[in-house]
Amino acid sequence: MTVDLTVDRAAVPPAPPHGNPAADAWYAVPDDAGVMVFTEDGYLSLLEIYSASSEPIASWPEPLFLKR
């Protein structure tokens, strides 16, 4: 599941350049899911949740299960 992010580039300056994903973590429940945040030109651009199992992610897991 992917969410495109839009940032008002006139409101804030870009972050320093770095690789993608900018951040990633996994979920304890379900134990086969993870989340990644991507940037483009120094601004948040994409939030993606993925599954390592054959079952696709149908809804966002609870944030309290997020592990970094």
Image (tube, rainbow, N blue to C red):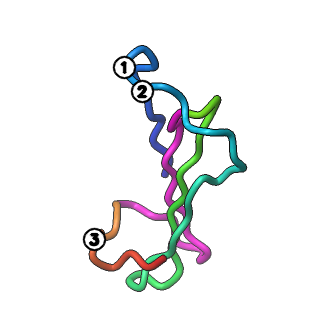
Q: Earlier in the sequence, mark 3 or mark 2?
A: 2
Q: Residues within 10 Å of mark 3 (few under 14, many from 20)?
A: few
Residue indicated by mark 3: 62
User: What distance separates the C-alpha of mark 3 from that of mark 2?
Assistant: 24 Å
Disc 3 or disc 2, which is closer to the eye?
A: 2
Note whether 36 is above or below 33 in the view shown: above
Tell me where residue 39 appears, x and y as whole percent. 59, 40
Q: Is residue 26 above or below residue 50?
A: below
Residue picked out by circle 1 = 11
Q: Which residues are magenta?
A: 43-59
Distance, label 3 to label 1, CA atoms, is: 30 Å
The residue drawn where x is 48% and y is 85% is 31
Measured from the top left, where is residue 14 in percent x and y?
54, 29
| Residue type indicated by callout 2 | Val
Amino acid carrying label 1: it is: Ala
Q: Is residue 27 left or right of residue 15?
A: left
The stretch drawn in magenta includes residue 55: yes
Identify which residue, 58 or 9, lies in the foreground.
Answer: 9
Q: Quadrant of residue 11?
A: top left
Picture quadrant where residue 3 is located: top left
Instruction: State the CA–CA distance, disc 2 to disc 1.
Output: 8 Å
Residue drawn at (68%, 50%), measured in percent from left and top? 20
Helix, strand or loop for disc 3? loop
Task: Give the x, y percent position of residue 45.
Answer: 53, 36
- In contact (CB < 8 Å): disc 2 and disc 1: yes
- Which residue carries the number 2 mark? 7
